[in-house]
Image: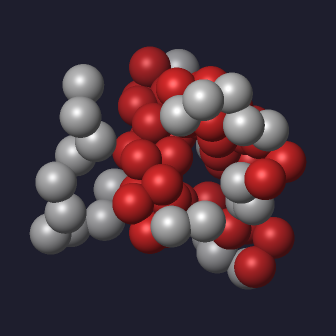
Amino acid sequence: MSAETEERIRARAHEIWEAQGHPEGLAEEHWAQASAEIAALDGGGSEAALPNPLATGASAAELAKPKRGRNPPPA
């Protein structure tokens, strides 16, 4: 996955988390939903092709925060 795609997914997962009122324990679900949405926008790829960084040991808190210094994905 490209860094740009990962950042788009991260930003979308953060939006989902905020819209749901900042719930704890749903980072994997938010990531999966965001992955599916971004894959669909990018031509219908499979969410399975977009790995969840939680599997690599990233914390839910790390994933919920957008990275600084990068532009947000185009609207």
Residue name at image x 60 percent, y 29 percent: 43
44 relative position to 74: left or right: right
11 or 43: nearer the viewer: 43
Residue 7, given in percent of the width and then of the height, sits at 41, 57
Residue 58, given in percent of the width and then of the height, sits at 64, 75
Residue name at image x 16 percent, y 54 percent: 71
Residue 53, given in percent of the width and then of the height, sits at 68, 68
9 or 40: nearer the viewer: 40
62 or 31: nearer the viewer: 31
Q: Quadrant of residue 30?
A: top right
Residue name at image x 23 percent, y 34 percent: 74
* Extreme residue toward the bottom, this view: 57
- Number of marks in the rendered image: 0
Residue 66, given in percent of the width and then of the height, sits at 34, 56
User: Can residue 26 be seen by looking at this rendering?
Assistant: no
Residue name at image x 75 percent, y 47 percent: 28
37 relative position to 4: left or right: right
User: Can residue 34 be seen by looking at this rendering?
Assistant: yes
Q: What is the basis of the colouring in this image?
A: secondary structure
Q: Is residue 51 above or below residue 46?
A: below
54 relative position to 12: left or right: right
* Extreme residue toward the front, this view: 43
Q: Is residue 25 above or below residue 37?
A: below
- Pick the quarter of the image with the N terminus: bottom right
- Pick the quarter of the image with the C terminus: top left
